[in-house]
Structures are given as C-alpha cells and as structure tokens.
Amino acid sequence: MQQIKLKLIAFIVLGGALATLIGFTLHCYSWRPGHITDHCGTTPWLTKQFEALELRRMVLMYDEETELEKYLKELAKDPSNCHAMEQVAQLYLNLQQWDKAVSSYESTVQKCPKDARSSFWLGVTYYITGRTELGLRKMEAAIRLAADQGDKEMEMSLRDELRFFLEKARKNELPKIRSGQP
C-alpha cells in the first residue's frame, strides 16, 4: 500500500510539474500557423525564430511545406499581402531553399519597403548565402529604417538580433552552404 501511495504522489508531482510547464508555455507563447509569439519577452526575435522552428517540428509537428503551399495560395489571391510574402520568404529560408529565399525577401522588401523586419531578414539571407558585406549593410539599414520610423521596440529588437546573429556567425553556427548548392 505504501508503494502505491508513493507512486501516486510521484505521479501527482510529475503531473503538476508538467501542467506548470504547459501553463507557462501557454502563458508565454501563442501560436497560429506560421507564427509563434513570445508574450513574456524572454528571447530576442531571431532566437525565437530558431526556437520556433524547432518547437514547430518537435511539438506541433509543423509541416513547413504545407504552410508554404498555404501562403503561396494566399499570395495568388492577394499579391500585395506583405505578411504572406514575409512568411513565404521565411519558409524558404527555413527549408534552406536559398535562391528562393533571397528572391522572396527581395520581392517582399520591394513591395513592402517600410517592413524593417523583412529588410533585416533579407540581409541575413544575403549573409548566409555568402554576400556578407551586402548582408551586413542590409541588416544595418533595416535597423536605421526602424529608427527612422520611430519604432524603438523594433529598432532594439533588430539590434539584439544583429548581435545574436553575429555571435552565431563568430561561433560558426550558421547553416553551411556548399558551392553549387541551390
């Protein structure tokens, strides 16, 4: 009987810990297809993108190719949908379809020139694909764009992202692109 009580107590404690973790996750993060929002502000945006990708794959069984098809259909209906354009570009980047990611971000920045985040990610994509100087210039220009728009939160977020990104580059933790890889 004592052993059953101990097992029951262990089950309740573990269940409570799991419930607390789930409650914290639900409190701090909201999810809709293609987007995870951190309400607690615990990590910079770029970090969240990498974590969100992992979270989608592991927990939500997120299918990026299905999401890509969905956003491509949205763009077919409304080619000026800046959110859908940015999501398509991000999904191409996540899927490591480098040329499509670059062209999608270029198109997004051209059609949505006030979108500092897309401008920043265009710079990230340039950097990852070997155009490091152009990438750095684009990331810095995106930070200036946010500052010029008076969006201090975006400006600070992008500054944090740039620091984080450069740290990952310094540690050689960015995706590897082999010569001749699409």
Image (spheres, rainbow, N blue to C red):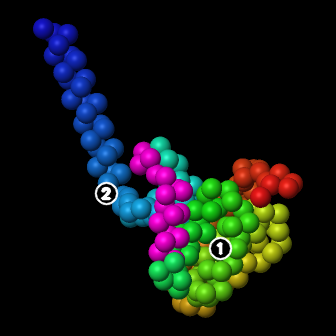
Residue 65 is covered by the magenta coloring: yes
The one nearer the camera, 10 or 123, is 123
Which stretch is magenta?
Answer: 59-75
- Which quarter of the rendered picture does the N terminus lie within? top left
Q: Main secondary structure of the magenta part?
A: helix
Residue 152 seen: no
Q: Which residue is mark 1?
A: 104
Q: Which residue is mark 2?
A: 27
Residue in view at x 53 percent, y 83 percent: 79
Location of residue 36 in the rendering, given as x and y in whole percent from the top left corner: 44, 61
Residue that protrudes farthest toward the right in the picture: 179
**Local secondary structure at mark 2:** helix
Residue in view at x 67 percent, y 67 percent: 101
Residue in view at x 77 percent, y 78 percent: 137
Q: Amino acid at mark 1?
A: Ser
**Mark toward the viewer: 2 or 1:** 1
Q: Amino acid at mark 2?
A: His
Location of residue 95 in the rendering, given as x and y in whole percent from the top left corner: 63, 56
Q: Is residue 55 above or below residue 30?
A: above
**Local secondary structure at mark 1:** helix
Residue in view at x 49 percent, y 57 percent: 66
- Left or right of 22? Residue 117 is right
